[in-house]
Amino acid sequence: MSQHSSPQKGGSVPSKGGSAQRWQKVARRIRVPLGFLTAAIYLVEVARRPPHPTAIAWSLALVLPGLALRAAAAGTVKKDRELTVTGPYAYTRNPLYVGSALIACGFALALLSWPVALLVAAGFAAIYPPVIAAEERFLGAAFPEFASYRVRVPRFIPRLNLAKARHGNDLSGISPAVTQAPAGGFSFTLYLKHREYNAAIGAILLYLSLLFLRPALENLLHAVR
């Protein structure tokens, strides 16, 4: 989910390469189920491993910025209605996915599990590039200004400043909002509409699991014995 609900809403968009398009469709369909499967495997690993308070503390340096970035993006994007180029979308074309990557890396760090880290990396590599490609194909067809926007804003790794966009030439093809977000650009109503609070709730539950799931299971087994 980035700037729209469905890359092919209202009809299909022609694409190059039938196999690539088929995988994009598969990736969109399995993305959510794969997320639940990964969470289940994560909880199994949490139950098997003692908590690492230091690693859990360090993980906050990734998880909290990830949550903040996703919140800012969800409160800015207006799916299917316009090409969003303000707020975090002025630094990266996919702030929601960047935020998800930060959160996933943070929780992999918190668990100190190489298998989980490799699973997360493989999942992102297999799912998100084709999903992003499909979404950008849709945006390019729906919004003529997307071609200019994609030239100036990176697909994933955020740029740290907007100096080139401010002082560059030929800005006529893109909204000025790319370089200057309007006051009150963030909308809490949009944040609620997109149910982004679920990400924060999920993060809290995972942290509680990291801290208390294994000790609770050990106490339960001790009581049974």
Image (tube, rainbow, N blue to C red):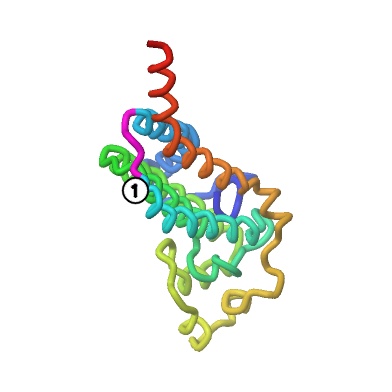
At mark 1, the secondary structure is helix
Task: Looking at the picture, tell me which residue is in the foreground, 122 or 27.
Answer: 122
* Residue 25, magenta (yes or no): no
Residue visible at 47% across and 70% down?
153
**For residue 217, above or below residue 116:** above
Residue visible at 41% across and 31% down?
43
Horizontally, residue 76 falls left or right of residue 21, namely right
Residue visible at 44% across and 74% down?
160
Task: Looking at the picture, tell me which residue is in the foreground, 128 or 80.
Answer: 128
Q: Toward which corner of the image does residue 127 lie, by quadrant?
A: top left
Q: Toward which corner of the image does residue 34 lie, by quadrant?
A: top left
Give the labeled residue for mark 1.
Answer: 109
Residue visible at 70% across and 48% down?
193
Q: Position of residue 52 (x, y in %)?
A: 34, 43
**For residue 144, above or below residue 139:** below
Give the residue at the far right of this rendering: 189
| Residue 129 visible in the shown view | no
| Residue 222 visible in the shown view | yes
Horizontally, residue 217 falls left or right of residue 10, namely left
Q: Position of residue 204 (x, y in %)?
A: 53, 43
Q: Position of residue 63 (x, y in %)?
A: 46, 53
Q: Which amino acid type is marked by label 1? A: Leu
What's drawn in magenta, residue-wise? Answer: 48-52
Task: Tell me which secondary structure the magenta stretch mostly adopts.
Answer: loop
Task: Name the quadrant of the C terminus.
Answer: top left
Q: Badge 1: how crowded within 10 Å, few (<14), some, or many (20+)?
A: many
